């Protein structure tokens, strides 16, 4: 496995040249576009890292998986999906249009920004501080990494420039999808996106999902198997923005990407994978990260289809 990962990283690194780091959150533009790393956690307890697997990056949209799990634990699926739909979209991750045109007017799914902001609002905790404390505690537990924290430079950068997210949130406040203090909910959302991780951390979250909700290294159940199934299904249909269909065809693994350059992939009953490469394609997915996962899936026959 180590040799395979090393060769995959080495010959896919050239693809980092084809993408650009995200700049719409100014702080993210400081990333090194040539970074590329992978970490694999198998369910029988083996771990392998290659390339820039220990470089820190912010979770961004990958955090939406964590907050969906927490929203499900707090409220149950019925309440969550009363507010947020579970349909894929061909629109961009921060699209506003469908919020108004769909009936009922609820966000399409919890992996696009509108749905994720709604999911965060459902997490128990009467203020941003309380919610984020619980999100961090949960993230530390499922990664087994007590050091996990927030990159406040990225948080401030996103808070200052997140006008589109603000528009989504206020629109949802007007239609009753959100209740309570919009700015407080947005702060929690911006903070969850700014949680700093490495490939290893996201591989471990994926391994728990791959293991049907149980931490493979301790045997502790984190979420019911039914919730793990819901989350993985939504990752397949909605996890890679408006490139989810192509990812399902070419890679075939439940995955979730973030504009920080991470991709988390959970191979049911086999392994969790974390990939990082901040050079993104036009859809917001890591260009070289996609190539790495495509090759790994082919080599190890990982597609679930
Ligand atoms: N914080 C980012 C935003 O809300 C997350 C988007 C992403 O990673 O896709 O725009």
Image (cartoon, rainbow, N blue to C red):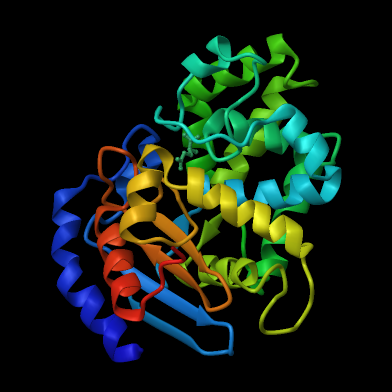
Foreground pick, 29 / 236: 236
The x and y percentages for residue 102 are 57, 15
Q: In the picture provided, is 37 more to the left or to the right than 211? A: left
Residue at point 49% right, 45% down?
A: 237
Relative to 32, say whether 164 is above or below: above
Q: In the picture provided, is 65 more to the left or to the right than 75? A: left
| Quarter occupied by the C terminus | bottom left
Q: Quadrant of residue 187?
A: top right
Q: In the picture provided, is 128 more to the left or to the right than 295? A: right
Relative to 269, say whether 62 is above or below: above
Q: Is residue 60 visible?
A: no
Q: Is residue 173 visible?
A: yes
The x and y percentages for residue 76 are 83, 45
The x and y percentages for residue 170 are 63, 14
Residue at point 21% right, 82% down?
A: 7
Q: Quadrant of residue 171?
A: top right
The x and y percentages for residue 124 are 84, 41
| Quarter occupied by the N terminus | bottom left
Residue at point 50% right, 36% down?
A: 88
Numbered-mark total:
0
Relative to 4, say whether 203 is above or below: above
């Amino acid at each position: 496995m180590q040799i395979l990962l090393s060769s995959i990283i080495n010959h896919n690194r050239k693809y980092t040249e084809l993408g650009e780091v995200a700049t719409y959150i100014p702080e993210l533009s400081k990333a090194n576009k040539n970074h590329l790393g992978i970490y694999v956690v198998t369910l029988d307890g083996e771990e392998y890292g290659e390339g820039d697997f220990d470089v820190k990056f912010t979770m961004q949209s990958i955090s939406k998986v964590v907050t969906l799990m927490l929203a499900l634990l707090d409220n149950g699926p019925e309440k969550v999906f009363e507010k947020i739909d579970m349909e894929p979209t061909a629109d961009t991750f921060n699209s506003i249009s469908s919020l108004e045109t769909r009936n009922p007017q609820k966000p399409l799914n919890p992996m696009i920004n509108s749905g994720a902001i709604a999911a965060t609002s459902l997490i128990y905790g009467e203020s941003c501080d309380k919610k984020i404390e619980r999100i961090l505690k949960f993230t530390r537990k499922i990664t087994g990494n007590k050091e996990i924290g927030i990159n406040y430079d990225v948080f401030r950068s996103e808070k200052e420039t997140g006008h589109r997210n603000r528009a989504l949130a206020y629109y949802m406040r007007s239609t009753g999808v959100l209740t309570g203090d919009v700015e407080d909910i947005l702060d929690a959302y911006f903070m969850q996106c700014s949680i700093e991780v490495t490939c290893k951390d996201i591989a471990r979250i994926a391994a728990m999902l791959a293991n049907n909700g149980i931490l493979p290294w301790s045997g502790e159940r984190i979420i019911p198997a039914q919730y793990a199934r819901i989350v993985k299904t939504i990752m397949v249909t909605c996890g890679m923005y408006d490139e989810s269909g192509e990812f399902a065809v070419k890679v075939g693994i439940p995955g979730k990407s973030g504009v920080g350059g991470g991709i988390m992939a959970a191979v049911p009953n086999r392994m969790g994978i974390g990939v990082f490469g901040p050079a993104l394609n036009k859809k917001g997915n890591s260009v070289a990260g996609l190539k790495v996962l495509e090759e790994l899936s082919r080599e190890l026959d990982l597609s679930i289809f």
